[in-house]
Image (tube, helix red, strand yellow):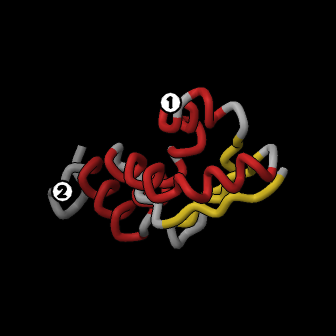
Amino acid sequence: MSNKSGTPLGDAIEHYFRHQGIKRRMEQASVVPEWSELVGDKIAAVTSPREVRRDGTLIVAVKSAAWMQELQLMEPTIRTQLVKRGKKIKRIVWRGE
């Protein structure tokens, strides 16, 4: 199916989403349901991703202060792994539950 300009509808929708930043936001938000497979069971057991802000900041709740401290030290490694898997996360903010 094409629109009046002859562009396939799917391409037009893709262009619109990309232009509006929706595609990037969807990619960022995909971190939440994929969290355990992205970070592993050990980290997933003590954390819960809450939101991804428009600026690429991921907010993650952490069950204990000890884990929060450990995860703050691990953040560069975790963020690098997220980026390698196509997640456009610029920083992670760890918060107590």
Q: Is residue 10 left or right of residue 79?
A: left
What type is the residue that disc 2 sits on? Thr
Residue at the spot x=68%, y=58% of the render?
94
**Which secondary structure, mark 1?**
helix
Which residue is depicted at the point 35% across and 70% down?
19
Residue 36, compared with residue 27, is above or below; it is above
Residue shown at the point (28%, 50%) measured from the top left? 9
Q: What residue is pinned by disc 1?
A: 37
Q: Quadrant of residue 14?
A: bottom left
Q: Position of residue 25 (x, y in %)?
A: 48, 59
Seen in the picture, residue 61 relative to 46 is either above or below; the reply is below
Disc 2 marks which residue? 7
From the top left corner, tell me how far across and down residue 7 is, in percent.
18, 56
User: Could you classify mark 2 by the number of other residues whose Cα lies within 10 Å: few (under 14), some (14-19), or many (20 or more)?
Assistant: few
Instruction: Tell me the SS state at disc 2.
Output: loop
Give whichever of discs 2 and 1 has the lower sequence position.
Answer: 2
Residue placed furthest toward the top: 41
Residue 84 coordinates in the image, percent (x, y): 32, 48
Q: Is residue 59 above or below residue 10?
A: below
Q: Is residue 24 left or right of residue 10?
A: right
Mark-to-mark CA distance, 2 and 1 = 37 Å
Residue situated in front as seen by the camera: 82 or 4: 82
* Residue type at numbered disc 1: Glu
Looking at the rendering, which quadrant does residue 48 occupy?
Answer: top right
Which residue is at 69% across, 56% downward?
69
Asked if labels 1 and 2 touch by Cβ distance under 8 angstroms, the answer is: no
The answer to which quarter of the image holds residue 79 is bottom left
Mark 2 or mark 1, which is nearer to you? 1
Q: Nearer the viewer, residue 85 or 73?
A: 73
Disc on res. 18:
none
Residue at the far left in the pictured view: 6
Q: Position of residue 33 (x, y in %)?
A: 58, 37
